[in-house]
Amino acid sequence: MNKVLSDIRLFLRQEEGVTAIEYSLIAFLIATVIILATMSIGINLQNVFCNVAKGIGNGINQVPAC
């Protein structure tokens, strides 16, 4: 019986699983921020290129559909 109780105490003291979960949550949050930033930059870049294309299109009387 003492062996079982000591095994349970040892199991409850182990923190490797908790640390792994914390690291995975941090990695998930960092990946989410990177994805959102990339999407935002991509939309802004698309608008810039669209405006440039419209400016060039106005110069040659062809306005692209953006």
Image (cartoon, rainbow, N blue to C red):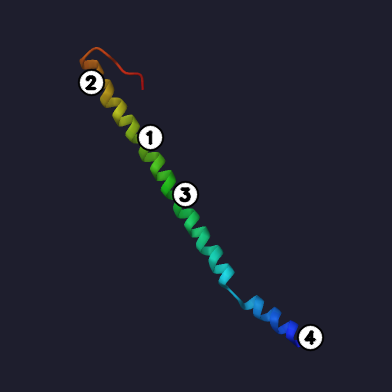
In the picture as drawn, the residue positioned furthest to the bottom comes out as: 2
- Identified at 23% across, 21% down, the residue is 56
Find residue 17 and report its horizontal and vertical position in percent. 58, 68
Dot 4 falls on a residue whose secondary structure is: loop
Dot 3 falls on a residue whose secondary structure is: helix
Q: Quadrant of residue 14?
A: bottom right
**Tag 2 and tag 4, C-beta contact below 8 Å:** no
Q: Distance between the residues labelled 1 and 3?
A: 17 Å
Q: Residues within 10 Å of mark 4 (few under 14, many from 20)?
A: few
Judge left or right: residue 18 versus residue 1.
Answer: left
Q: How far apart are marks 2 and 1 (CA)?
A: 20 Å
Judge left or right: residue 31 versus residue 65.
Answer: right
Q: Quadrant of residue 35?
A: top left
Q: How far apart are marks 3 and 4 (CA)?
A: 48 Å
Q: Quadrant of residue 51?
A: top left
Q: How crowded is mark 1: few (under 14 residues within 10 Å), some or many (20 or more)?
A: few
Circle 3: residue type: Thr
- Identified at 70% across, 84% down, the residue is 6
Write down the residue under mark 4. 1
Name above or below for residue 4 compared with residue 44. Answer: below
- 4 or 1: mark nearer the eye: 4
**Tag 4 and tag 1, C-beta contact below 8 Å:** no
Write down the residue under mark 3. 32
Find residue 22 and report its horizontal and vertical position in percent. 53, 64
